Image (cartoon, grey):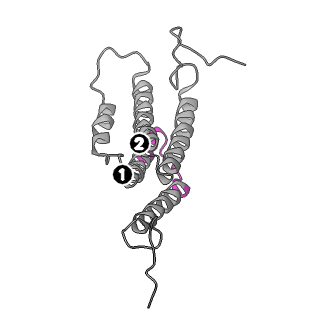
Amino acid sequence: MSAEPSNGTGQALEPGQRQGPGEAVAETLADFRFEAVLAAVKAARGDVLIGAHLTLQLARHVLVIAMLLRDRDAGTNHHRHGGSRWDQWATRLAAAPTPYSRAGITATIRFYARTLDEILACWDPEAHLDSSLLLDLLSAVDLYGADEASASLPGTPQTPGFRRIPSA
């Protein structure tokens, strides 16, 4: 069993701390995709707590790429002061929907996927995040949630405890 790389404090290394910046972006993108799918699945299963937690993590991945872009521009990963053009990405994330319901989770994942695609274009103008499978999954989760919501309306056959009144 191998230990996870550490920064000496027992904390796991952030992407880019022991690898090249391009590798760090690829790792961050893979983590984003994994967590976005997992958050969508959790939302579909009604686990809004974990779905929201994972969805909020997606913002961090966008910020990591913004930090890697700042490092690339400055030629260092040590910054005594802020104020770079990459700071705007933190502000832009404030426009995200709130992920505290099934519909909120899917809307927020869509927002972060679009934002990730935009910031990846800053890293490599030829890069494009193919989010079609993720967007299809989110649409299915939305449809499932709509079906489930309508099924729980009083008086519908799917509602537990529903009894048909026998016809006379």
Q: Residue at x 33, y 37 (%)?
A: 89
Residue in view at x 46 percent, y 51 percent: 46
Q: Quadrant of the N terminus?
A: top right
* Circle 1 crowding by C-alpha within 10 Å: few under 14, some 14–19, many from 20: many
For label 1, the residue is 104
Instruction: Identify which amino acid the numbered label 2 is placed on.
Output: Ala
Outermost residue, right direction? 1
Are discs 2 and 1 less than 8 Å apart at CB?
yes
Extreme residue in the front direction: 168
Instruction: State the image coordinates of residue 48 (x, y, percent, origin top left).
Output: 42, 46
Which numbered dot is residue 77?
A: none
Seen from the viewer's position, the closer of residues 164 and 86 is 164
Whether residue 63 sits left or right of residue 88 in the image: it is right
For this rendering, which residue is in front, 43 or 118?
Answer: 43
Q: Name the amino acid, label 1.
A: Gly
Q: Which image quadrant for residue 67?
A: top left
| Magenta-colored stretch includes residue 130 | yes
Magenta stretch bounds: 116-133
Question: Residue 73: percent from the left, percent from the top?
Answer: 40, 27
Badge 2 is on which residue? Answer: 52
Relative vertical location of residue 157 with respect to residue 144 in this rendering, above or below? below
Whether residue 94 appears in magenta in the rendering, the answer is: no
The residue at the point 43 percent across, 81 percent down is 165
**Which corner quadrant holds the C terminus?**
bottom left
Q: In the figure, 55 relative to 3: above or below? A: below
Dot 2 falls on a residue whose secondary structure is: helix
The number of numbered discs placed on residues in the rendered structure image is 2
Q: CA distance from mark 2 to mark 1?
A: 9 Å
What residue occupies the far top of the structure in this picture?
8
Q: Earlier in the sequence, mark 2 or mark 1?
A: 2
User: What is the secondary structure assignment of the residue under circle 1?
Assistant: helix
Q: Position of residue 151 (x, y in %)?
A: 43, 68
